[in-house]
Amino acid sequence: MARFDYSNQVTGKDIARGRVNEAPISPKHAIEIAGFIRGMKLDDAAAYLEGVVALQKPIPFKRFNRNVPHRKGLVGWDAGRYPQKASRVYLRLLNNVRKNAEYNGLEGDQLRIVHVSANRGIRRRSFMPRAMGRATPKDRQTVNIELVVREQEA
């Protein structure tokens, strides 16, 4: 198995990190969510992503926005979607980072996301059954996500 390391070497005693490897979600959705929650407080990001899962708050699609419809509630941008599956993975990651921060002695309400990146992972080979006993090869995409938070002074 390959050795994984964080791409951004943020150091210090006031940080907590978390990582998800080979999550079976869309890389485009993961990249758009990463760009949106970067710089947010951890609690605010989790609350917003819960709204995305409930189909109440859209994620603005700024890079992969071809043929993406406009959504209500976006400030400064029109195109957006509700990537529920990717949002659930990010919520699990945010919860994991919060618990890592508490274990390190950091306060959960003072955490701000300083680094988040989503990269394409390996492609898993699968087959789609077709008529007459044939099958078409299909690659399933995975995503590697890393997140670093830092405790901010009140």
Image (cartoon, helix red, strand yellow):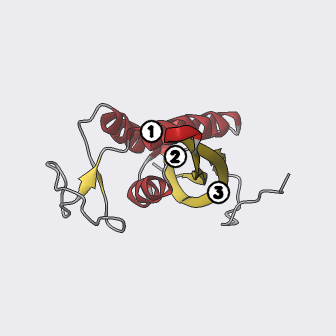
Alpha carbon of mark 2 to alpha carbon of mark 3: how far? 10 Å
Disc 3 target residue: 121
Q: Residue furthest left?
A: 72
Answer with the quarter of the image where residue 87 lies: top left
Give how far across and how far down residue 36 sits, in percent: 38, 57
Q: For residue 123, what is the image quadrant?
A: bottom right
Marks 1 and 2, how far apart at CA: 7 Å
Mark 1 or mark 3: whose residue is earlier in sequence: 1
Q: Looking at numbered disc 1 in the image, what kind of residue is underneath it?
A: Lys
Do labels 1 and 3 touch, CB within 8 Å?
no
10 Å crowding of disc 1: few (<14), some (14-19), many (20+): some
Dot 3 crowding, Cα within 10 Å, few <14, some 14–19, many 20+: some
Residue 92 in picture, x, y percent from top left: 54, 35
Residue at 31% x, 44% y: name it.
Answer: 82
Query: How far apart, in angstroms, are the residues tagged by discs 1 and 3?
Result: 16 Å
Disc assigned to residue 2: none
Which x, y percent locates residue 95? 55, 34
Disc 2 marks which residue? 25
Query: Which residue shows up at 26% across the image and 47% down it?
Result: 58
Q: Which residue is mark 1?
A: 85
Q: Is residue 135 visible?
A: yes
Kindly indicate whether the residue at mark 2 contacts the one at mark 1 (C-beta within 8 angstroms).
yes
Sequence-first tag of 2 and 3: 2
Q: Amino acid at mark 2?
A: Ile
Left or right, 34 with reference to 137 = left
Q: Amino acid at mark 3?
A: Gly
Q: Residue at x 31, y 66 (%)?
A: 62
- For mark 2, does the 10 Å Cα neighbourhood hold few (<14), some (14 to 19), or many (20 or more) residues? many
Query: Measuring 58% from the left and 45% from the top, which residue is drawn there?
Result: 135
Along the line of sight, the residue nearer the viewer: 91 or 138: 138
